Amino acid sequence: MKRFAVLASMVGLALAVSSAHAFTLQPAATGVVWEGTWSADQNGNPYWDGNSSDYTQPGNIGNFIAGNGAFTGHPQSPNNPTMPYLKGSGSNAGTNGMPIDVYFDAGPQPNWAALKIEIAGLSNYNYFGIYEQGNKPANLAELLTTPPGTLGSSGKSMLLFKGTDGPGQSITFVAPWSQFGFYLATESSTTPGTVVRAFFSESTLNTGSELNLQHFAFFQAGPTAYYVGSEDLPLGSSDKDYNDLVVYVAAIPDASTWMLFLAGMPAVLALRRKRA
Ligand SMILES: [Ca+2]
Ligand SMILES: [Ca+2]
Ligand SMILES: [Ca+2]
């Protein structure tokens, strides 16, 4: 069992997002809803409320958001036990509140920023990025295209964080499509450049046993800011803790705002230097 170092203070995460509505969450099918009543008690409900096997228990994404269990006093936790999570509804609902298909509208305001928060055991092989809504690349190896911010060769995906990026890594990006989803791809540890698993926030794009099974948990940190937790193993054989790669993502009025924000996070930089 590993416990990963705390690397960044998330204090002051309230970004000076402009009043312009940079984007909206676009529900697929008949919709998704934000649900602020939940309890991270490892009972499998909501769907992300599993019992972590690679982090001190109880330590799933809900514990991180709430700032309880193994994340009590965690400096990166937003400490919000009622932060709404995205719940499936109607025909977009899986079991235990799972939203089957989730994607985002890039919006008229093009700039987004993402901050990698916390990683788990398979970190070196996990790749996190965005893809064009409804249109994943045929060749999943494109999901590993580096450096972050680079489009895959078919233009359907963009890596945001590669496995070896440490917590505190950040990126600003412009989605080249009107709508996008998030993906998590795991690279083979024995055959570099080969994808052994890939999950999409539109889980109808997943394959095999993971078809229609959501591998991401979304929490609404603000009108234009989200926490995205991910589960990197097939749900039938995983702990469903959804903390395997956690990203804070926000629409920002312009990149300079994000840079100002980062300038206020010397702890991140100091710790990253210390770790390097
Ligand atoms: Ca629960
Ligand atoms: Ca997991
Ligand atoms: Ca985990």
Image (cartoon, helix red, strand yellow):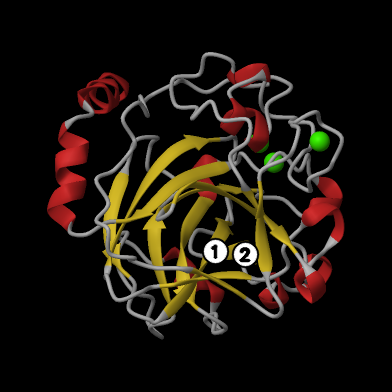
256 is higher (above) or lower (below) than 194: above
| CA distance separating discs 2 and 1 | 7 Å
Q: Could you say which quadrant of the image residue 195 lies in? A: bottom right
Identify the residue position indicated by label 2 in the image.
Answer: 198
Q: Tell which tag, 2 or 1, sits nearer the viewer.
A: 1
Measured from the top left, where is residue 19 in percent x and y?
27, 58
Q: Quadrant of ligand 1?
A: top right
- Identity of the amino acid at label 2? Ala
Residue 184 horizontal side relative to residue 144, left or right: right
Q: Residue furthest top?
A: 73
Which tag, 2 or 1, sits closer to the chain's start?
Answer: 1
Pick whichever, 56 or 126, lies toward us: 56
Measured from the top left, where is residue 200 in percent x and y?
61, 67
Q: Secondary structure at mark 2?
A: strand
Q: Could you say which quadrant of the image residue 117 lies in? A: top left
Pick whichever, 34 or 133, lies toward us: 34
Q: Are marks 2 and 1 in contact (CB under 8 Å)?
A: yes
Q: Which quarter of the image is occupied by the N terminus?
A: top right
Q: Is mark 2 within 8 Å of ligand 2?
A: no
Q: Secondary structure at mark 1?
A: strand
Residue 258 horizontal side relative to residue 223, left or right: left
41 is higher (above) or lower (below) than 226: above
The residue at the point 73 percent across, 23 percent down is 58
The residue at the point 44 percent across, 20 percent down is 75
The residue at the point 27 percent across, 51 percent down is 17
- Identity of the amino acid at label 1? Tyr
Identify the residue position indicated by label 1 in the image.
Answer: 183
Q: Which quarter of the image is occupied by the C terminus?
A: top left
Residue 131 horizontal side relative to residue 93, left or right: left
- Determine crowd level at label 1: few under 14, some 14-19, many 20+ residues with C-alpha closer than 10 A: many
